[in-house]
Amino acid sequence: MRIVIALDTSAHSDRALDWVTRIRWPAGSRMLAVSVMQPMPVALSGYETGPALAEEYGVLRDQLNDRLVDARRRLREAGFSADIRVVNGDPRDALVELVRAEHADLVVMGSHGRTGFAKLVMGSVSSHVVTHAPCSVLVVKADTCVEPTQPPQKEEQS
């Protein structure tokens, strides 16, 4: 089974990664942890923002690389075959394209939980991937706290 885990620098991604490491996947499953870097925006005004913007962009790339290296370590410690990759582009489209190219069986990602106007303005990467990916997509919600590998506990009767 090929599983793509979409990560950014948020706690929501961390929950998705934790969820993946707690599941008993079929033997031979391969994990690919991926982050998407949006293209560096071009200054829209007459102000000189190039060097500051490039520096901020570099800091973000370093944070994503560190995040992916940590994710690979955690996945391997959990016993999984794991690779990492940073791709460029709009996160919605880049993830769908990557999933197609990798022939993934499943995408796992966190949800930022935006609703209403914030979702309308900022869009939802998870909603787009759910709608357009050629495979199943698991969106780990912020309050997911059930240990998926543990059977339900029976209540003691008095």
Image (spheres, rainbow, N blue to C red):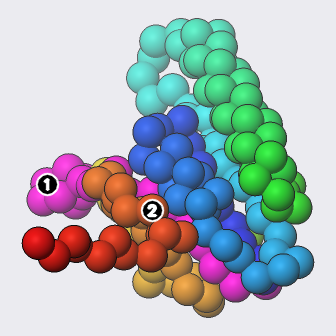
Query: Residue 39, image x and y in percent?
Result: 63, 42
The quarter of the image holding the N terminus is bottom right
Give the label on residue 147, or none. 2
Quarter of the picture containing the C terminus is bottom left
Image coordinates for residue 66, horizontal then vertical, percent: 73, 29
Disc 2 is placed on an element classified as loop
Judge by depth and name the residue closer to the eye, 46 or 50.
50
Residue of label 1:
117
Q: Amino acid at mark 1?
A: Phe
Foreground: disc 1 or disc 2: 2
Query: Residue 133 appears at what percent x and percent y?
Result: 57, 82
Residue situated in front as seen by the camera: 18 or 85: 18
Q: Which residues are magenta?
A: 101-121
**Which element carries disc 1, helix, strand or loop?**
helix
| Residue at (53% x, 13% y) in the render | 49
Horizontal relation, residue 83 to residue 2: left or right:
right
